[in-house]
Image (cartoon, rainbow, N blue to C red):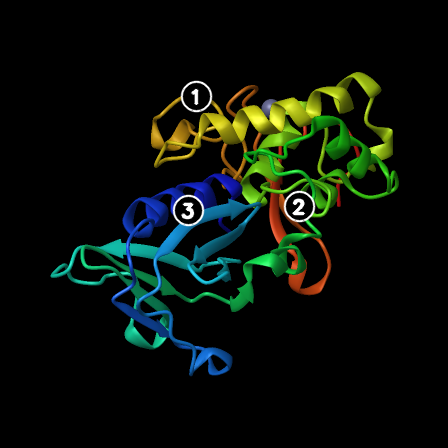
């Protein structure tokens, strides 16, 4: 699942490729947008909001997309081969004279009036990498449902925006508690550290192609627990455990160290 830092990197790449240039091609391959044509309009900017991408074009329109589990936007030079996936997975093509942006497997693609963007992203909590970041509000949102499991509260973008499944497990490890701990049972001192720690993790990875929470670039040492079960915890050597957390379609593989992290487990 793309995390907030991935979405920010994607937005920056799209912004550099498209902003300030008129579109020479616009091909939106979802039924609702079959007749929409943005050709000739200049792209004003591409802005990330949590895990949403807002591509604003001249004339007061915004193309809203979301990557969800495995969507992506790729940018190609005019004669470069497209390698983001088979053609039937392409949902959007936006081209300028110099670049072509291709959106693959986008589960959300809609055209809004820029004035109505709040309809698409107004539910989001403060964005960890955004100009609206507000650590106090993020913490208040998280603590508003004290019985909720920490891991699930962290993934809920209405509390704070930008944390995906990897950072969820890594943050719980760094806080020393399991993802199943009811958030209201976090010691006050730990809870107070949470927003700044989350921001630090995402910021440290904002410009990095390979995400790390340990600060170690070696592929098998980049993350403390995520994806490591049943290998040893990087800190104490205990085998890392994993289980799904969440209900139904929101179930996500979750990792923790039974020695370094205290609290309930499944
Ligand atoms: Zn450990």
Q: Position of residue 205 (x, y in %)?
A: 44, 30
Q: Which mark is residue 106?
A: none
Point out the frontmost of discs 3 and 2. 3
Q: Position of residue 39 (x, y in %)?
A: 32, 70
**Mark with earlier residue (1, 2):** 2
**Mark with earlier residue (1, 3):** 3
Q: Quarter of the image holding residue 94? A: bottom left
Q: Height in image: 41 above or below 207? A: below
Q: Is residue 177 rendered to the left or right of residue 147?
A: left
Nearer to the camera, 139 or 22: 22
Task: Decide if residue 260 is in sight here.
Answer: no
Q: Which mark is residue 215?
A: 1
Q: Element under label 1?
A: loop
Task: Decide if residue 22 is in sight here.
Answer: yes
Q: CA distance from mark 3 to mark 2?
A: 21 Å
List the residue tagged with mark 3: 11
Q: CA distance from mark 1 to mark 3?
A: 24 Å
Q: Are marks 1 and 3 in contact (CB under 8 Å)?
A: no
Q: Is residue 266 rendered to the left or right of residue 75?
A: right
Residue appearing at x 22%, y 56% in the figure: 99
Nearer to the camera, 84 or 44: 44
Q: Residues within 10 Å of mark 2 (few under 14, many from 20)?
A: many
Q: Is residue 242 rendered to the left or right of residue 215?
A: right
List the residue tagged with mark 2: 155
Q: Are marks 3 and 2 in contact (CB under 8 Å)?
A: no
């Amino acid at each position: 699942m793309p995390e907030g830092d991935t979405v920010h990197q994607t937005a920056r790449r799209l912004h550099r490729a498209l902003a300030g240039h008129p579109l020479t091609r616009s091909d939106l391959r979802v039924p609702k947008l079959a007749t929409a044509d943005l050709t000739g309009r200049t792209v004003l900017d591409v802005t990330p909001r949590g895990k949403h991408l807002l591509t604003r074009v001249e004339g007061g329109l915004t193309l809203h997309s979301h990557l969800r589990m495995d969507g992506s936007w790729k940018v190609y030079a005019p004669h470069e081969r497209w390698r983001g996936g088979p053609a039937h997975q392409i949902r959007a093509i936006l081209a300028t004279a110099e670049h072509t942006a291709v959106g693959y497997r986008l589960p959300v693609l809609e055209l809004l009036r820029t004035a109505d963007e709040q309809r698409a992203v107004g539910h989001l909590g403060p964005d960890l990498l955004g100009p609206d970041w507000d650590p106090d509000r993020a913490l208040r949102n998280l603590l508003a449902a004290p019985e909720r499991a920490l891991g699930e509260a962290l993934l809920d973008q209405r509390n704070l925006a930008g944390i995906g499944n990897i950072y969820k497990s890594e943050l719980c490890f760094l806080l020393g508690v399991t993802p199943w701990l009811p958030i209201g049972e976090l010691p006050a001192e730990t809870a107070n550290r949470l927003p700044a720690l989350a921001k630090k993790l995402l910021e440290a990875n904002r410009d990095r192609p390979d995400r790390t929470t340990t600060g170690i670039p070696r592929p098998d040492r980049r993350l403390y627990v995520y994806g490591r079960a049943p290998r040893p915890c990087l800190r104490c050597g205990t085998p890392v455990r994993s289980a799904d957390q969440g209900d139904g379609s929101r179930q996500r593989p979750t990792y923790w160290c039974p020695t370094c992290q205290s609290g309930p487990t499944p």
